[in-house]
Image: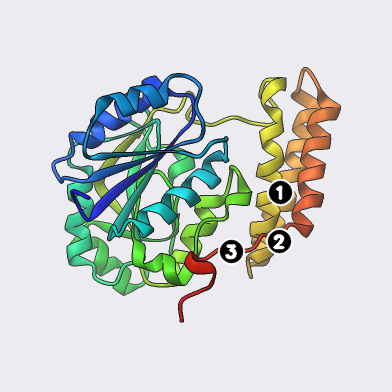
């Protein structure tokens, strides 16, 4: 351990992007370690990373593809077990600006007892990446003061791209739900973290997310060989709506489902029945999906 801060990066068969991610992390103005969780890539990732012989990089191979959710759950568990104080989470296609972590730590020093902090995530064209935009809180006078003095915006939940948090909270909130596989794990986990203290969006800590599209993949237009992933989007979305005490969240999920079905019927050129089946199965399974939140040592700290 060379630092009390560790970047937790999950990767799967994106070596060229991972190389950029690693280079950007090693170029940070604030020293940190890198815990690389490889979901059993087959593109030479293991050979490249282990061949670097870099003392700041810890490489772990999960043995199979656990999805982003399983990879982040694995990584947060290992970072906590290794004794790090803070975790900084991101995907392998995330490229932090050199001062991104320094700006996070500036806020961490000024905003005590925070639950998590989130960087601003941009797409390659310099615009804010919609899928990585946090959910804002209603602004009270206290919140306005925080924005004015600390250049931060209070938030309720965020994506895992650039999420920074004290690993001591893992003892009380548990680990991300690995069974999500993909979609929604970051929102669910940061909502749990948020119960432990205030959370902030740091407007001058910047990360570029080199995703292929700013609007993301969609059940209506995705290639047929990739539509299976949207089962998790539907199932996990229903789970999150069930957990919410806000009626509007349940109505939003219902509207989302029907909008996708109508969109498939009207606009999908191939595999319409399969797309509707995947969405419907996700909704039905989500109603009975009730994964257990896992804790270090098997139980929640008192």
Q: Earlier in the sequence, mark 3 or mark 1?
A: 1
Disc 3 on helix, strand or loop?
loop
Q: Position of residue 185 (x, y in %)?
A: 55, 51
Q: Position of residue 273 (x, y in %)?
A: 86, 28
Q: Cβ–Cβ below 8 Å for labels 3 and 2?
A: no
Residue drawn at x 21%, y 46% as measured from the top left: 32
Q: Position of residue 103 (x, y in %)?
A: 19, 50
Which residue ends up furthest to the left in the rendered image? 29
Q: Quadrant of residue 58?
A: top left
Task: Name the mark nearer the viewer: 1 or 2.
Answer: 2
Question: Does residue 69 lie above or below 114 as drawn?
Answer: above
Residue drawn at x 20%, y 55% as measured from the top left: 105
- Tag 3 residue: 293
Residue drawn at x 54%, y 68% as measured from the top left: 298
Apparent side of residue 6 relative to residue 47 in the rendered image (left or right): left
Residue drawn at x 29%, y 49% as measured from the top left: 6
Mark 3–mark 1 distance (CA, rounded to whole Å): 17 Å
Q: Quadrant of residue 251?
A: bottom right
Mark 3–mark 2 distance (CA, rounded to whole Å): 9 Å
Q: Answer whether residue 176 is visible to the viewer in this image.
A: yes
Which residue ends up furthest to the right in the rendered image? 273
Disc 1 on helix, strand or loop?
helix
Q: How is the image coloured?
A: rainbow
Mark 1–mark 2 distance (CA, rounded to whole Å): 11 Å
Task: Name the mark nearer the viewer: 3 or 1.
Answer: 3
Apparent side of residue 177 relative to residue 81 in the rendered image (left or right): right
How many discs appear? 3
Image disc number at residue 285: none
Quick one: label 1, few (<14), some, or many (20+) residues within 10 Å?
A: many
- Tag 1 residue: 235
Disc 2 on helix, strand or loop?
loop
- Tag 2 residue: 290
């Amino acid at each position: 351990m060379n630092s009390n801060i560790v970047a937790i990066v999950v990767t799967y068969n994106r070596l060229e992007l991972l190389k950029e991610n690693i280079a950007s992390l090693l170029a940070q103005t604030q020293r940190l370690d890198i815990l690389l969780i490889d979901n059993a890539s087959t593109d030479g990732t293991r050979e490249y990373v282990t061949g670097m012989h870099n003392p700041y990089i810890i490489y772990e191979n999960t043995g199979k593809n656990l999805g982003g959710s399983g990879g982040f759950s694995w990584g947060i568990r290992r970072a906590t077990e290794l004794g790090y104080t803070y975790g900084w989470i991101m995907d392998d296609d995330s490229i932090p600006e050199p001062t991104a972590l320094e700006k996070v730590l500036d806020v961490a020093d000024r905003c005590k007892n925070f639950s998590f902090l989130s960087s601003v995530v941009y797409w390659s064209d310099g615009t804010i990446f919609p899928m990585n935009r946090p959910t804002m809180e209603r602004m009270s006078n206290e919140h306005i003061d925080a924005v004015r003095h600390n250049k931060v915006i209070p938030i309720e939940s965020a994506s895992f791209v650039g999420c920074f948090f004290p690993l001591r909270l893992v003892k009380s909130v548990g680990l991300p739900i690995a069974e999500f596989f993909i979609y929604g794990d970051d929102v669910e986990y940061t909502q749990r973290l948020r119960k432990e203290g205030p959370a902030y969006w740091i407007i001058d800590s910047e990360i570029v997310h080199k995703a292929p599209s700013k609007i993301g993949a969609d059940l209506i237009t995705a290639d047929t060989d990739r539509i299976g992933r949207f089962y998790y989007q539907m199932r996990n979305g229903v789970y999150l709506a069930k957990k919410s005490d806000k009626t509007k969240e349940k109505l939003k999920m219902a509207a989302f489902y029907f909008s996708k079905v109508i969109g498939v019927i009207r606009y999908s050129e191939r595999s319409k029945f399969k797309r509707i089946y995947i969405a419907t199965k996700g909704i039905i399974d989500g109603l009975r999906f009730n994964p257990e939140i896992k804790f270090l040592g098997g139980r929640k700290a008192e």
